[in-house]
Amino acid sequence: MRRRPRVLTWHVHGNYLYYLTQADCDFFLPVADGKSGYSGRSGSFPWGRNVIEVPADEVRHLDIDCVIYQSRDNYLRDQHEILSEAQRRLPRIFIEHDPPRESPTDTRHVVDDPEVLLVHVTHFNALMWDSGRTPTRIIPHGVLVPDGVRYTGTKPKGIVVINNLATRGRRLGLDVYQYVSRHVPLDLVGMGSKNLGGLGEIPQKDLPAFMAEYRFFFNPIRYTSLGLAVCEAMTVGLPIVGLATTEMPVTVVNGESGWVDTNVDRLIGRMKSLLEDPAAARRLGEGARRHALAAFNIERFANEWLDTINEVTGQAGLARAEGAQ
């Protein structure tokens, strides 16, 4: 009989980690004061009992099956500081959350090892990275929103959800947000958003219901991975307006689930139309929700991750045999 996979990983992206832990595994998170990636079960997430904190200096004594790295620091520094030599030889996965920064087309990934599985969270990321000899896989996002939270669109405004936009600049679309907000009413939420006149951070458990009142979701980001807030907004039923960059053109279908374009002035016109026509906004939101329920299904996501972890740890055959009984 196989045991539940026991996985060590770090708290790098809280939302993603929460969704990852929906997989039927035990996840061990190292904890250390004041150290990035070592915050354990922090945040406002309803962590399950399968998410277990471990003091960083005790990690080397853990009985685990797999290590999942989620950042360069995890891979280049942390593993050498907290893992035993035997743990560093265990099956390894690296989750790449972002497209390459140095060059969008010619950046070699930090992992160069045929014994590590590199998991990209979007097809765009996989396309842009030079993954070299490292085997790769794409596991698209899966999200959860509270039961019964549905779009109302009663606020004649758009909502923008980005953390620390003031300090992250053009890549996250600071200038685009500022330009559009001079023409269309927008509310910005997220960590540090008050620095730009925004509303501050909304707890994750409250964000879907908070977004549901807005007429549309606006994504001004030029170049990053597909934001989980976009997936969550679509699942609630908000129409999406955004730049036609990275994974957005294959996530939003113009006229069916929202509007994407590289012409910002044209997007402003689309937003104004949604403000003037609530029925049209609702129709697009329904299309967004249909797409999200199929594309970002949390059961699909959790099962893909469980299958992947079973595969790299050599338990896939056992799992299949047990399922056939």
Image (cartoon, rainbow, N blue to C red):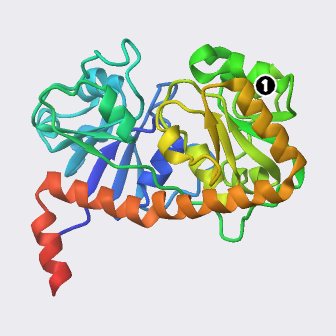
To which quarter of the image does residue 177 belong?
top right
When asked about the image quadrant of residue 315, the answer is: bottom left
Name the residue at 27% across, 55% down: 6
Q: Nearer the viewer, residue 3 or 264?
A: 264
Q: Nearer the viewer, residue 279 or 143?
A: 279
Task: Name the side, left or right, on which 47 lies relative to 279.
Answer: left
Residue 122 appears in which quarter of the rendering?
A: top left
Q: Which of the image's four quarters has the N terminus?
A: bottom left
Mark 1 sits on what residue? Answer: 180
Indicate the quadrant containing the C terminus: top left, top right, bottom left or bottom right. bottom left
On screen, residue 289 above or below 13:
below
Q: Position of residue 263 (x, y in %)?
A: 65, 25
Q: In the rendered picture of this protein, how many numbered marks are placed on residues?
A: 1
Residue 170 picture location, percent across and down: 61, 15
Question: Can you name the residue that lies furthest to the bottom here?
Answer: 325
Look at the image and tell me whether residue 200 can be seen: no
The residue sitting at 55% across, 39% down in the picture is: 227
In the image, is 140 to the left or to the right of 46?
A: left
Q: Position of residue 247 (x, y in %)?
A: 47, 38
Q: Residue at x 67, y 62 (%)?
A: 286
- Picture coordinates of residue 304 (x, y %)? 31, 59
Q: Amino acid at mark 1?
A: Val
